[in-house]
């Protein structure tokens, strides 16, 4: 209590704009961030939490426009197209008081390139990061990379001194179940600082009154309490009964009720995320199938699956209209999107059965489908629907639905034959998709390509996209690559997700298509 | 006396030993901890190194001894799921479970005794009959259905009480409590009722049966004949004699409450050890399962021991027989 | 009186001459049954639900476990509606996958009852065998079995079931979990519940062992197993049956609870507990039938089996009256 009074005094003294607002915002969604270590995981809920605590050089605001964060300006070096120059904001301090220098930025970018870091996939083009002076960072790439800053929107900046003090110079090795100091403690430069954190239960953040942007942003929330609630019904009950103020992922079945509830409202928009199914098409034999070969290796089988999966019915019945059926793994606002490729194949069971028979699987086969049950909107429901759709062409699917941390860890260990995944494109460019999902899994590239798919031409194009500076030529490469993977049916796209956030109706806050709320923008209508 | 005490303590130790053996076997035979901790990309050398580091290359007996030594220091390793120290996880969540269990035990005991007395004394009244019928439904209803029903009624339709969690929690450093804030207390009501209802009906029926039994004895009839008021007879004479067996049952039920908290915690998203355990079972998180098992066993053994000793203190007949069962 | 009761144990009543039937109808059991309307009602409900579960494949319009039969386009049909798309009629509505709730309840109670009966039988067989051995042989076997029983009795059975469940699942690869879920449930619930039977049988065996007819059998040199199975076993079965009737209700609730906690039957083969867990998501969205009907079905089943168990215990065990 005493502490709160003191804090309020400090706020009043320091800030005139925010002094009127000692508002607490209670925020919920289905899943907690996996870790506070900002470079260990490249995952939505983890980034969403860390964005409140840390800053990035560049970030995407609530309209997904690129905005200066800790970098005030960035440009390609006048003399060397291989080098990007970032001017670092001056006078910024970390929550624990250290001053931000170019050296911290160099340290953070290098830390994110460590082999434990899931973020390294975004930084494959980087050759070297160096501090030119105290406020300038040079990032040298192997080849000229016109879109490099787009890759920095989830790259959080840590303090080198803090990391060294606590022995967390290396990112947490998540797959190995490592726990480090950085997993539960964070020292960022962001708009909120961590007061307490109980993973999966409750994270309390308070406004950072020394924030460099305190005059630029509304910053009306003085205390931000994040409570993940696993059960959809409980989440909705909590909002209805006023125990939380903002619900980030409204279950589709409850959108209508929450929209009509007095004192509440929905904000909706398209999300930058596509849900799809992946198959191991590279192995000689599947782990869970009852065949001694690999049916997925046959393109006809993949086409049959594509024909059997009825995206439109999933949209109507499972998503209640809150999705857009998809034919490619890139939502409309991504560079390289093509309406033609995104068109959904109408379901055709007869043709699918013919294809199965042609491929020699007329009697079907049995395989296990792995799904998360707390990551995407109605993920388990979609998978159940797929089970029933594939049963119609003779494929008996055993469904395993489990929590996302297990799902992703096992996926990363390449233990899956058939799985669900969702993919967002924070860089707004197709190269990101090819780099992670289609390039042969080797080195830093193809790190989320668990299909075993490997195509020389696609690899070539993927690498070339990162280097081509001529926009037209580059777009042609993207188009060609999309056509190849589309014809090969590497993945079975389901839909682009739509987002609904429900909140108290005195809150002024729009959805952000990355599903990453920046609470520094949130305003209360008095 | 001493022989009885020693026998009971020895038995308690035996129980703990068996439970430790089970927990250890969990560790040892369910899944490969090394595979769980290292990814598939790890080399054989990495595995061997970790095996040595965890002491898994030692003879089984040595490992078991090490396990007991660690367990005695409340050291259970790292959770496979959340990559955190198991003892931290449990200690962090223990206050939530204990507060819930104790409050619902108090609720069950107080209400159980009051209703039990009432239904015994006012045997014929319609209210008694109603309470008895309702209690039968209470026993038959699975705990989770009761919880859902209460949430629907009081949180959703009426909007009176919170539907989940502990509300505002005050951190006392060594303990975090929800008992000091209004929202914490409000959050406690529904889960406590859900958890306590089953015990309540049990205690109520027991008190009623014992009370009826006592009321039939000559000694009560005699007291009545002496012209003592009904209230004095009922409360002073009858109740006192009723409570002895009731107390022992209540002691035993306390442990059951902690175990049943698993279900209540799941329904109400109560951040206690029960919810932790159920997630551990779902994800085969062996260290958490083993630690929870040991912890619950300890609680039960201690309660049993205390109840036995209480019984011994209360019932003089046991002393004569020298503690034989 | 005990004679009458014993005759009812000899099962196929109808096959006996009319005399026996008449004796049965005049017996205590029937007398007590006829006098309690609640018990009559409970019997009717139980029989209806048993029949529904038993004949589910013939009664249910749909096999809710077969993914081919689910019509996704019919998802969330309200009760008493006919689908515009497929023409299917949904008596109690359909769930998020187009699963007919009525069929799901029939098949779900089938699982509840199957798991309930199998778990009770398993516990009963195991407990009786161990109890007989402990009571008849005595010595170190008795000490060992009873110590284990003591340890297990320290824990509530739902916790034991959860633990056993967790252990068995740890041994099996994850893709097998759905396939063997029902067997794992039976074993877990059965194993968590054998102690009561063992204790009762052991006590009764020790009493029977001292009786003259057993002594006589020993004197004439009958082998142990004949004495055990032909003489002692029939005489210790009554307490076992009493525990078993109550045990059935408990086992049904245990299965529902485990499935509700998400560690029992998977969503693709829902039992009543699973249906309730899934239905919870639709508590606010207006699709009340997905939660309500399975909840009511479970309540009716548990309550009526419990009532019958209570009543049977009272009738079979005059001491408790």
Image (tube, rainbow, N blue to C red):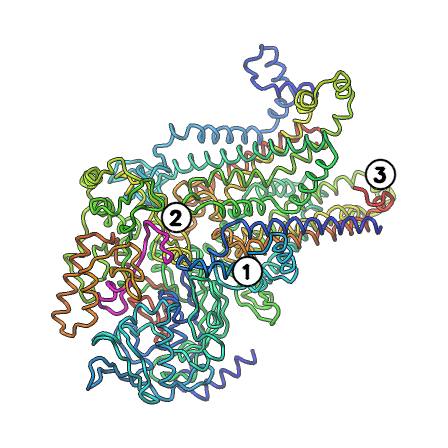
Q: Viewer-proximal residue, B173 or B225?
A: B173
As helix, strand or loop, the secondary structure at mark 1 comes to loop
Q: Quadrant of the C terminus of chain C?
A: top right
Left or right position of C109 against C73:
right
Chain that bears disc 3 = B
| Range of residues picked out in magenta | A412-435
Q: Is there any visible trace of residue B162 in the rendered image?
A: no
Determine whether the residue tagged by mark 2 lies in a helix, strand or loop.
strand
Q: Is residue C142 left or right of residue B42?
A: right
The residue beneath circle 2 is: A400
Q: Quadrant of residue C131?
A: top right
Question: Which residue is depicted at the point 56% across and 78% down?
Answer: A1
What x and y, as percent, mark residue A473? 12, 69
Q: Which residue is mark 1?
A: B54
Disc 3: which residue = B218
Asked if badges 3 and 2 are on one and the same chain, I answer: no
**Magenta stretch: includes residue C92:** no
Q: Is residue A279 above or below residue C178?
A: below
Mark 2 and mark 3 in contact (Cβ < 8 Å)? no
Image quarter in which the N terminus of chain C is found: top right
Packing grade of label 1 (10 A; few <14, some 14-19, many >=20) is some
Of the image marks 1 and 3, the number of the one nearer the N terminus: 1
Q: CA distance from mark 1 to mark 2?
A: 31 Å
């Amino acid at each position: 209590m005493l502490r709160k009074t003191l804090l309020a005094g400090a706020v009043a003294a320091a800030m005139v704009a925010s002094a009127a607002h000692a508002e607490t915002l209670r925020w919920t969604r289905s899943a907690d961030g996996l870790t506070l270590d900002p470079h260990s995981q490249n995952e939505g809920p983890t980034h969403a939490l860390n964005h409140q605590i840390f800053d990035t050089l560049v970030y995407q605001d609530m309209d997904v426009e690129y905005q200066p964060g800790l970098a005030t300006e960035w440009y390609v070096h006048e003399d060397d197209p291989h080098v990007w120059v970032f001017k670092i904001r001056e006078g910024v301090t970390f929550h624990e008081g250290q001053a931000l220098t170019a050296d911290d930025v160099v340290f953070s970018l290098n830390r994110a390139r460590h082999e434990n870091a899931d973020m390294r996939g975004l930084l494959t083009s980087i050759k070297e990061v160096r501090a030119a002076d105290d406020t300038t960072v040079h990032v040298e790439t192997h080849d000229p990379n016109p879109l490099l800053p787009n890759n920095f929107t989830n790259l959080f900046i840590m303090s080198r001194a803090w990391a060294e003090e606590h022995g967390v110079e290396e990112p947490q090795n998540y797959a190995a179940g490592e726990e480090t100091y950085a997993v539960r403690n964070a020292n960022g430069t962001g708009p909120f600082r961590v007061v307490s954190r109980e993973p999966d239960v409750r994270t309390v953040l308070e406004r950072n009154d020394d924030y460099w942007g305190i005059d630029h942003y509304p910053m009306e929330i003085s205390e931000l309490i994040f409570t993940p609630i696993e059960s959809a019904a409980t989440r909705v009950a909590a909002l209805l009964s006023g125990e939380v103020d903002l619900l980030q992922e409204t279950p589709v079945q409850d959108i209508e009720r929450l929209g009509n509830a007095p004192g509440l409202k929905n904000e909706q928009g398209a999300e930058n995320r596509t849900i799809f199914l992946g198959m191991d098409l590279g192995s000689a034999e599947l782990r869970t199938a009852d065949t001694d070969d690999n049916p997925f290796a046959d393109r006809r089988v993949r086409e049959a699956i594509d024909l059997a999966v009825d995206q439109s019915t999933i949209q109507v019945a499972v998503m209640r209209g809150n999705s857009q059926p998809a034919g490619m793994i890139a939502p409309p606002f991504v560079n390289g999107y093509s309406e033609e490729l995104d068109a959904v194949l109408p379901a055709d069971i007869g043709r699918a059965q013919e294809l199965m028979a042609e491929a020699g699987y007329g009697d079907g086969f049995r395989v296990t489908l792995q799904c998360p049950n707390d990551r995407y909107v109605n993920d388990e429901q979609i998978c159940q629907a797929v089970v029933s759709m594939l049963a119609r062409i003779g494929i008996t699917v055993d469904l395993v639905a489990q929590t996302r941390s297990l799902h992703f860890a096992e996926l990363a260990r390449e233990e899956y034959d058939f799985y669900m995944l969702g993919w967002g494109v924070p860089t707004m460019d197709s190269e990101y998709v090819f780099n992670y999902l289609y390039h042969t899994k080797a080195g830093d590239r193809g790190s989320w390509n668990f299909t075993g798919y490997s195509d020389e031409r696609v690899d070539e194009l993927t690498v070339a996209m990162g280097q081509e500076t001529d926009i037209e030529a580059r777009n042609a490469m993207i188009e060609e690559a999309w056509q190849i993977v589309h014809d090969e049916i590497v993945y079975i796209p389901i839909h682009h997700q739509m987002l609904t956030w429900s909140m108290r109706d005195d809150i002024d806050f729009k959805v952000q298509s990355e599903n990453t709320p920046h609470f520094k923008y949130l305003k209360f209508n008095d | 006396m001493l022989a009885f005490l020693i026998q009971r303590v020895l038995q308690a130790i035996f129980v703990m030993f068996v439970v430790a053996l089970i927990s250890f076997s969990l560790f040892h035979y369910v899944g490969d901890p090394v595979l769980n901790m290292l990814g598939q990309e790890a080399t054989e050398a990495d595995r061997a190194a970790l095996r040595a580091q965890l002491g898994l290359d030692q003879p089984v007996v040595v490992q078991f001894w090490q396990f007991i030594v660690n367990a005695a220091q409340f050291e259970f390793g790292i959770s496979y799921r959340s990559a955190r120290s198991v003892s931290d996880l449990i200690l962090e969540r223990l206050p939530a479970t204990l507060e819930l269990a104790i409050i619902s035990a108090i609720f069950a005991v107080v209400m159980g005794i009051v209703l039990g007395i009432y239904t015994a004394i006012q045997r014929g009244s319609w209210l008694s009959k109603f309470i008895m019928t309702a209690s039968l439904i209470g026993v038959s209803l699975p705990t989770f259905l009761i919880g859902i029903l209460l949430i629907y009624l009081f949180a959703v339709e009426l909007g009176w009480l919170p539907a989940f969690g502990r509300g505002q929690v005050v951190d006392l450093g060594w303990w975090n409590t929800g008992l000091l804030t209004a929202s914490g207390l409000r959050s406690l009501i529904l889960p406590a009722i859900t958890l306590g209802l089953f015990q309540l009906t049990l205690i109520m029926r027991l008190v009623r049966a014992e009370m009826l039994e006592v009321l039939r004895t000559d000694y009560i009839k005699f007291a009545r004949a002496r012209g003592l008021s009904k209230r004095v007879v009922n409360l002073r004479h009858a109740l006192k004699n009723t409570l002895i067996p009731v107390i022992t049952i209540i002691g035993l039920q306390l442990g059951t409450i902690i175990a049943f908290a698993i279900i209540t915690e799941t329904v109400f998203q109560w951040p206690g050890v029960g919810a932790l355990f159920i997630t551990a079972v779902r994800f085969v998180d062996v260290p958490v399962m083993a630690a929870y098992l040991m912890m619950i066993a300890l609680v039960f053994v201690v309660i049993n021991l205390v109840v036995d000793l209480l019984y011994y203190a209360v019932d003089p007949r046991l002393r004569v027989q020298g503690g034989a069962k | 009186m005990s004679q009458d009761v014993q005759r009812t144990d000899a099962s196929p009543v109808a096959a006996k001459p009319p005399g026996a039937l008449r004796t049965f109808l005049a017996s205590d059991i029937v007398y007590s049954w006829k006098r309690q309307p609640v018990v009559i009602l409970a019997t009717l409900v139980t029989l209806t639900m048993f029949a529904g579960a038993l004949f589910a494949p013939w009664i249910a319009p749909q096999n809710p476990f077969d993914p081919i039969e689910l019509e996704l386009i019919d998802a969330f049909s309200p009760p008493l509606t006919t689908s515009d798309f497929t023409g299917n009629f949904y008596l109690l509505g359909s769930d998020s996958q187009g699963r007919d709730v009525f069929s799901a309840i029939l098949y779900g109670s089938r699982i509840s009852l199957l798991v309930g009966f199998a778990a009770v039988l398993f516990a009963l067989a195991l407990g009786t065998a161990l109890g007989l051995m402990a009571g008849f042989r005595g010595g170190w076997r008795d000490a060992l079995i009873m110590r284990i029983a003591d340890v297990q009795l320290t824990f509530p059975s739902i916790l034991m079931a959860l633990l056993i469940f967790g252990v068995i699942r740890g041994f099996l690869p994850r893709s097998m979990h759905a396939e063997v879920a029902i067997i794992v449930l039976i074993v877990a619930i059965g194993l968590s519940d054998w102690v009561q039977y063992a204790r009762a049988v052991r006590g009764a065996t020790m009493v029977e062992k001292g009786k003259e007819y057993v002594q006589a059998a020993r004197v004439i040199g009958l082998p142990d197993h004949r004495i055990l199975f032909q003489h002692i076993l029939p005489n210790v079965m009554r307490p076992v049956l009493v525990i078993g009737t109550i045990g059935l209700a408990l086992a049904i609730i245990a299965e529902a609870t485990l499935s509700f906690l998400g560690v029992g039957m998977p969503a693709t083969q829902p039992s009543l507990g699973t249906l309730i867990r899934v239905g919870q998501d639709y508590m606010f969205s207006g699709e009340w039938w997905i939660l309500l009907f399975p909840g009511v079905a479970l309540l009716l089943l548990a309550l009526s089996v419990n009532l019958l168990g209570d009543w049977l215990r009272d009738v079979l065990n005059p001491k408790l009256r």
